[in-house]
Structures are given as C-alpha cells and as structure tokens.
Amino acid sequence: MEYIGFTIYFFILTNGFLSQELLYKKFGYSVPNTAIAYFPFILLGGVIVPIVIYTHISDIIVLIKKIK
C-alpha cells in the first residue's frame, strides 16, 4: 500500500514540476497559478511534502525489515 502512495506522490510531483511558470512549462492553464508561492500554500512544498516523503520511506524500510 505504501508503494501506491509513493507512486501517486511522484505523479503529483511530476505534474507540478511540469506546470511551473518557467521555460520548460509543458502543460498548464493560460492563467498561471501564482497562489502557491504565498503563505500558507508554500508550506505544502516546503514542509508537508518532505514529511510525507520521509514517512513513506521510513514505513517502507520498516516493512522490508519486518518481512526479513
């Protein structure tokens, strides 16, 4: 189940990366979403996402150790 969450996370990360307002913008809307650069939305990428990554990786490690 953790692998499914990890896969969904990377899918969302890739979509967000490709939708940025930079030179490599591959898809998105005609009006860019600039709200994610302001508080409290900036906490999503700066705090919450790293916590989610850490917990997924630590849970996978615990599950692998439990199987062995």
Image (tube, rainbow, N blue to C red):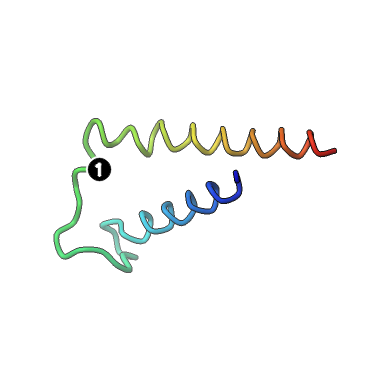
Q: Is residue 40 left or right of residue 54?
A: left
Residue sitting farthest toward the left:
31
Image label count: 1
Residue bearing the label numbered 1: 36
Q: Which amino acid does label 1 sit on?
A: Ile
Q: Residue 39 sits in which quadrant?
A: top left
The vertical placement of 34 against 68, above or below, is below
Q: Position of residue 50 (x, y in %)?
A: 48, 35
User: What residue is rendered at 64% in x and 34% in y?
Assistant: 59
The local crowd at label 1, few if under 14, some if 14 to 19, many if 20 or more residues have their Cα within 10 Å, is: few
Residue sitting farthest toward the bottom:
26
User: What residue is rendered at 31% in x and 59% in y?
Assistant: 19
Q: Quadrant of the C terminus?
A: top right
User: What residue is rendered at 21% in x and 36% in y?
Assistant: 38
Q: Nearer the viewer, residue 1 or 42?
A: 1
Q: Is residue 37 left or right of residue 65?
A: left
The vertical placement of 46 against 25, above or below, is above
Residue sitting farthest toward the right:
68
User: What residue is rendered at 43% in x and 52% in y?
Assistant: 13
Q: Is mark 1 on a helix, strand or loop?
A: helix
Q: Where is residue 54 in the image (x, y as percent from the top left)?
A: 56, 34
